[in-house]
């Protein structure tokens, strides 16, 4: 499985341009979206197994501010069966298997116990746990999991309904922290060092907003595609000056001209979904502020309830503590 390098284009969290949604939204208007969302969660939890291909992309505010290259996109080819998760990722197709929180990786002909690295030494990628994701989605607090937009679409010859949700405030932060999707933004990386105050200084906690789009078969509840954007707004990044290899950074005047600027810290368009009905492939068309990091995650599901579990040698199972 190869890793595709892709950088998200910066855009601000403020105004959302108007855009007609056409007949697709009208066709979906008659559907009971709350019922369909519940049906989709129940179906994905009941499936018990399946396969998926996922792509994760990160647009980190501190990396943008330092004018450093964005991290490449990470592709994962994986599957699940009950408590078992397996995946291959990276240019070398590194294989891993997880069971009850433990992980083994394939190194040549051998399997080795690892905490967070692949056999190649690269960090292990995020591997979706569909059971965890759909349980958390199903159990969102009342009101937080409301479908704000729906439309019909065609994917791989199937007529599907896109269900769009947006989380803000505590439900968004809890969802971002749950491990249901990859982490976002925030911390140092790539050789950068952030120094915080001592003496019990507690940095301000970042705010989160989460947009989700589920591509659902209305006939049986199968989710064929999942798209997620997690926005993390860290007030410490708003006026931060960064020095990398002796050169000053943090002047946003040189940002890509495609990026539209906004005042850091504004959240008027973060709260809830698109205010003018403008959605693209199920997600609100937002713009990105200078102090906001963005994580994008897309998953395509296949073989729901019919996926074959790969052969796992007895040695690998023993390392995992499974018989």
Image: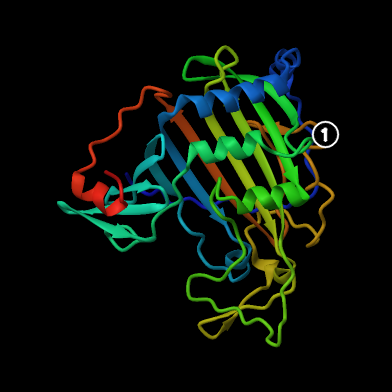
Q: Quadrant of the image for the N terminus? A: top left
Locate residue 216: give its quadrant: top right
Is any atom of residue 9 visible in this view?
no
Task: Tell me: residue 36, above or below residue 299.
Answer: above
In the displayed structure, 159 sits above or below 85; it is above
The location of residue 42, given as percent across then percent down, is 58, 25
Q: Which residue in the rendered view is the most extreme toward the left?
A: 109
**Up-down: is 303 above or below 298?**
above
Outermost residue on the front side: it is 323
Residue 79 as seen in the image, left or right of residue 231: left
Classify the position of the C terminus by image quarter: top left
Count of all numbered marks drawn on residues in the image: 1
Q: Nearer the viewer, residue 170 or 164?
A: 170
Name the residue located 27 percent from the left edge and 54 percent from the top edge.
Answer: 319
**x, y percent for residue 187:** 58, 68
From the top left corner, tell me how far across and down residue 294 is, in percent: 62, 53
Q: Is residue 38 above or below residue 18?
A: above
Figure colour scheme? rainbow
- The percent position of residue 145, horizontal first and vertical second, equals 72, 35
Left or right: 275 as drawn, with respect to 211: right
Q: Which residue is mark 1?
A: 276
Residue 96 visible somewhere in the drawing:
yes
Q: Is residue 200 left or right of residue 218?
A: right
- Nearer to us in this view, 53 or 262: 53
Task: Name the one closer to the observer, 249 or 33.
Answer: 33
Residue at figure coordinates x 83%, y 37% from the top left: 275
How crowded pointer 1 is (Cα within 10 Å; few <14, some 14-19, many 20+) is rated as: some
Q: Residue at the location (29% across, 58% down)?
A: 113
In what element is the residue under mark 1? loop
């Amino acid at each position: 499985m190869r890793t595709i390098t892709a950088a998200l284009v910066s855009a601000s969290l403020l105004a959302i341009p108007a855009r007609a949604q056409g007949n697709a939204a009208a066709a979906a208007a008659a559907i009971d979206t709350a019922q369909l969302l519940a049906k989709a969660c129940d179906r994905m939890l009941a499936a018990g197994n399946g396969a998926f291909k996922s792509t994760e992309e990160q647009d980190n505010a501190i990396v943008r501010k330092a004018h450093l290259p964005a991290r490449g996109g990470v592709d994962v080819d994986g599957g699940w069966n009950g408590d078992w998760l397996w995946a291959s990722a990276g240019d070398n197709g590194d294989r891993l298997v997880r069971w009850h929180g433990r992980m083994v990786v394939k190194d040549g002909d051998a399997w080795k116990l690892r905490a967070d690295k692949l056999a190649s030494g690269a960090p292990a990628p995020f591997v979706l746990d569909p059971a965890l994701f759909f349980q958390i989605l199903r159990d969102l607090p009342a009101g937080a999991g409301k479908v704000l937009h729906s439309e019909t679409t065609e994917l791989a010859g199937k007529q599907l309904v896109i269900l769009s949700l947006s989380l803000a405030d505590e439900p968004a932060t809890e969802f971002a922290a749950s491990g249901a999707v990859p982490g976002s933004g925030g911390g140092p990386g790539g050789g950068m060092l952030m120094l915080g105050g001592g003496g019990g200084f507690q940095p301000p906690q970042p705010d989160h907003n989460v947009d989700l789009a589920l591509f659902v078969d209305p006939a049986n509840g199968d989710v064929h595609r999942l798209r997620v954007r997690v926005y993390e707004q860290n007030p410490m990044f708003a006026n931060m000056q960064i020095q990398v290899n002796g050169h000053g950074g943090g002047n946003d005047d040189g940002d890509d001209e495609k990026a539209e600027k906004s005042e850091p810290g504004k959240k008027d368009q973060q709260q809830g979904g698109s205010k003018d009905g403008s959605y693209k492939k199920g997600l609100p068309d937002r713009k990105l502020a200078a102090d906001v990091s963005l994580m994008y995650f897309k998953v395509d599901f296949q073989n729901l309830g019919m996926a074959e579990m790969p052969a796992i040698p007895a040695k690998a199972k023993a390392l995992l503590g499974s018989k």
